[in-house]
Amino acid sequence: QVQLVESGGGLVQAGGSLRLSCVASGSIFRLLPMGWYRQAPGKQRELVASISSGGSTNYADSVKGRFTISRTNARSTVYLQMNSLKPEDTAVYYCKAGSDSENYWGQGTQVTVSS
């Protein structure tokens, strides 16, 4: 079992930056692929960025060049650095650990970008 706790959300003006953190419990963090997802009101949850256990990354087209996902296995933490934020980035951001067949989710953290 893996428990995830996100933090770092908040209210920011357009063009600003935020860094989200997700701390995982358990000793298998280094083996797990990790991802950040978001869900805006009335919309489906979507993948924002993912990082494999080996450090390979993948980004949604809408955030490429603005967001950076990284991980620190020693701290069992995955980060999402978000720069040049836009109002359309407003959503609840969720951390996910594991694969499509077996996965764990955090409780989410709200990110609100004002215009």
Image (cartoon, rainbow, N blue to C red):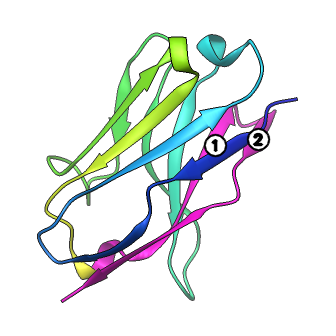
Amino acid carrying mark 2 in the image: Tyr
* Crowdedness near tag 1: few (<14), some (14–19) or many (≥20) residues, C-alpha within 10 Å: many
Q: Residue at x 50, y 47 (%)?
A: 36
Mark 1 secondary-structure assignment: strand
What residue would you read off at disc 2?
Answer: 104
How far apart marks 2 and 1 lie (CA) works out to 6 Å
- Quadrant in which the C terminus is drawn: bottom left
* Residue 37 x/y as whole percent: 52, 55
* Residue 114 x/y as whole percent: 25, 86
* Crowdedness near tag 2: few (<14), some (14–19) or many (≥20) residues, C-alpha within 10 Å: some
In the image, 29: left or right of 14? right
- Vertical side of 28 occupied by 8: above or below: below
Mark 2 secondary-structure assignment: strand
Pointer 2 with pointer 1, Cβ within 8 A = yes
- The majority secondary structure of the magenta stretch comes to strand
Q: Residue at x 17, y 51 (%)?
A: 66
What residue would you read off at disc 1?
Answer: 96
Amino acid carrying mark 1 in the image: Lys
The part of the chain drawn in magenta is 88-115
